[in-house]
Amino acid sequence: MARIGVQAMMLKDSFAEVGPFETLRKVADLGYRAVEVSQIPMDTENVAELERARTELGIEFAALSAQVDGAAGETPYAVLNDLERTVADCQRLGTKMLRIGMLPMGELRSRQTVEDYAKRANEAAEALAEHGIALYYHNHHVEFAKIDGRHVLDILADTAPAMGLEIDVHWVARGGLDPVRTLQKYAGRTAMVHLKDYRIGALSDEGIAAWEAGDFAAFMGHFASVVQFAEVGEGNLDFASIVPAAIDAGAQYLLVEQDQLYGRTVFEALKTSLDNLVALGFGDLF
C-alpha cells in the first residue's frame, strides 16, 4: 500500500534548530510516519539522529537525496563519486530509493547537454541497482520546456531507462500539463509523487495601485506573483483524483511538500494538509 509522508525540505529550518530527531518527533505527533530526506547535511551526527528516529519513532525513510556528480562527502550524495557511502547510508536508514531533486541548470542548454546528463544519470542508476537501490528524478516546470519538439523530461526518461521518476504535481500544473494525465503517462516508472497544491492568491494592494497609476511594468511583477504554493487541499488541484492516479501509476510514497508558507509555521501547514487529505478519504494512507 502507498503511504503519505513528508518531503523534508520543509523541515530544514527545524532540523537546523532542534535537530532531526526532535523535528521528526513533531512530525510523528502530527500523524506522519514516512519522510523523504532533503536539504540537510548528511553528516555523521544527522545520520545518527535519523537512524534514532527510525528506531524509536517508527519513521520510515521513503528516499534520500542524490546528485549524479560531485565530490565525496557532499550532500546530496554524489553517486558516481561516493557510491560506497551512499549505499551504506541507504542501508543504515532502511531505504531502497534515492532521488535527484533537479539537474544542474547548465545541463538545459541543449538537447545534447540534456542527453549527456541523462547518460551519466543512467550510469548512476545502474551502479545503485547492483546494490538493490533505485534512482529517481524529480521534476520542476523547466523539464516541460520543449527541445526539438519534445519535453526535456521525456528526453531524460528515454535516455536514462534505468532511472525512474518522482512526479511533482504542482510543477506539472505550473508547466502547463494535467497532473492526472501526466501520472498516467509515466505509470510504471513513478515510485514517488509530491503532493503540493497550486493556489492563485489575491492581487496585492501594491499591484492594484501600480495598475491604477499606469505603472504596468510594476503591475506585471505583482500580477505574476499571485501563483502560490499551498497546503494540500487549499489550492486548485484535484487531489481526490490525483491521489488515486498516483497509486494506480505505482507510487509507493506520496509526499506532502510546500515550498513557501506565507507566514504559517511548517507544522501548521503540515497539519492542514493532513486534515484535508483525511477529509478526502485518504486517512488509511498515513
Image: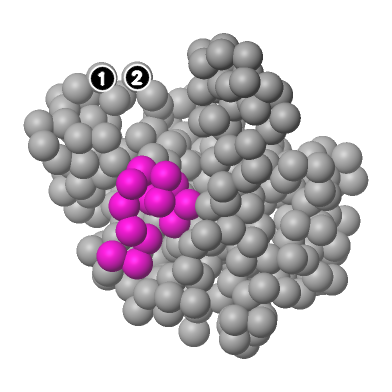
**Are the residues flagged by discs 1 and 2 in contact, CB closer than 8 Å?**
yes
Residue 47 % position (x, y) = 71, 49
**Image-based side of 207 in relation to 189, left or right:** right
Q: Residue at x 66, y 82 (%)?
A: 279
Q: Quadrant of the C terminus?
A: bottom right
Main secondary structure found in the magenta portion: helix
Taking the spot 37% from the left edge, 75% from the top edge, the residue there is 245
- Report x, y in % for residue 204: 69, 32
Q: Nearer the viewer, residue 134 or 9?
A: 9
Q: Is residue 53 visible?
A: no
> Which numbered dot is residue 106?
2
Q: Residues within 10 Å of mark 2 (few under 14, many from 20)?
A: few
Specify the quadrant of the image occupied by residue 142. top left
Front residue of 27/185: it is 185
Residue at 81% x, 48% y is: 264
Residue 253 in the image: state x and y as whole percent. Answer: 51, 69
Left or right of residue 31, residue 218 in this image: left
Q: Secondary structure at mark 2?
A: helix
- Element type at mark 1: loop
45 relative to 206, above or below:
below
The residue that mark 1 highlights is 109
The amino acid type found where label 1 is placed reads Arg
Magenta segment: 168-181
